[in-house]
DNA sequence: GCCAACGTTGGC
DNA sequence: GCCAACGTTGGC
């Protein structure tokens, strides 16, 4: 029994040179490996299948939201933390007590026009000060989006 | 490539 | 528990 019935929303960052919305469109579903920040991990642990995801390109020529995805699994241990050759290997993580989790993310659609970081900043008033993406110094790669913020962002033209 | 912001690590 | 050093993120 889920204690939560309403869908939640998230924003997940990826460097497009590493993994872009086009890559997600190609593979369909992708395990979101490599998150090594406790706050971001905890957000993933609270995700439910079907939650909405804004796919954000960071370190891009034009940073912004390029597509929509959805959560396709509950959180489970990120296998790359145990892979010695992986850049995400964490020697301190134990198989009996994995430190890092991930969720699977499923492609939904690519936006015709990206919602650029500039455009998002221009809507700061409508989005509110609690929007972590545009809070000063924020570096979280997985962050929550309220239903109201989701609506504001996707209705931007 | 630079650098501000911020998280983590480790010495004490 | 403090905090300096270091590493990473991510916009520019």
Image (cartoon, coloured by chain):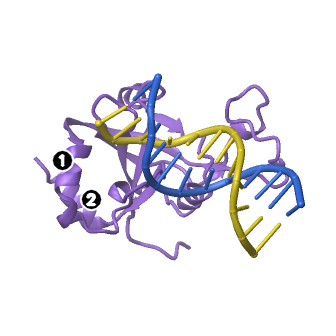
Chain colours: A purple, B blue, C yellow
Question: Which sits earlier in the primary sequence, circle 1 or circle 2?
Answer: 1
Question: In the image, what residue occupies the spot 85% across and 53% down?
Answer: A96
Q: Nearer the viewer, residue A71 or A55?
A: A55
Q: Is residue A54 left or right of residue B12?
A: left
Q: Is residue A66 visible?
A: no
Q: Is residue A129 above or below residue A50?
A: below
- The image shows residue A33 at horizontal and vertical percentages of 59, 39
Question: In the image, what residue occupies the spot 36% across and 55% down?
Answer: A133
Q: Which of A48 and A55 is in front in this view?
A: A55
Please rate how many residues cluster around mark 1, counting C-alpha atoms within 10 Å: few if below 14, some from 14 to 19, many from 20: some
**Residue beneath label 2, please?**
A150
Q: Distance between the residues labelled 1 and 2?
A: 14 Å
The reply to whether callout 1 and callout 2 are in contact (CB within 8 Å) is: no
Q: In this view, does A18 lie above or below A77?
A: above
- The image shows residue A50 at horizontal and vertical percentages of 42, 55
- The image shows residue A157 at horizontal and vertical percentages of 10, 46
Return the chain for callout 2: A
Question: In the image, what residue occupies the spot 21% across and 45% down?
Answer: A118
**Residue beneath label 1, please?**
A119
Q: In this view, does A24 lie above or below A37?
A: above
């Amino acid at each position: 029994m889920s204690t939560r019935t309403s869908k939640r929303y998230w924003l997940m960052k990826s460097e497009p040179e590493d993994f872009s919305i086009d890559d997600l469109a190609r593979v369909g579903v992708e395990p979101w490996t490599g998150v090594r920040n406790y706050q971001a991990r905890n957000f993933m642990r609270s995700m439910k299948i079907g939650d909405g995801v804004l796919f954000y390109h960071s370190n891009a020529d034009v940073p912004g939201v390029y597509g929509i995805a959805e959560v396709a699994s509950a959180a489970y241990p990120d296998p790359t933390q145990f892979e010695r050759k992986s850049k995400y290997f964490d020697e301190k993580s134990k198989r009996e007590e994995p430190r890092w989790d991930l969720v699977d993310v499923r492609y939904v659609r690519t936006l015709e026009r990206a919602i650029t970081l500039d455009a998002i900043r221009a809507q700061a008033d409508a989005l509110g000060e609690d929007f972590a993406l545009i809070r000063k110094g924020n570096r979280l790669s997985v962050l929550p989006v309220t239903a109201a913020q989701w609506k504001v962002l996707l209705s931007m033209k």
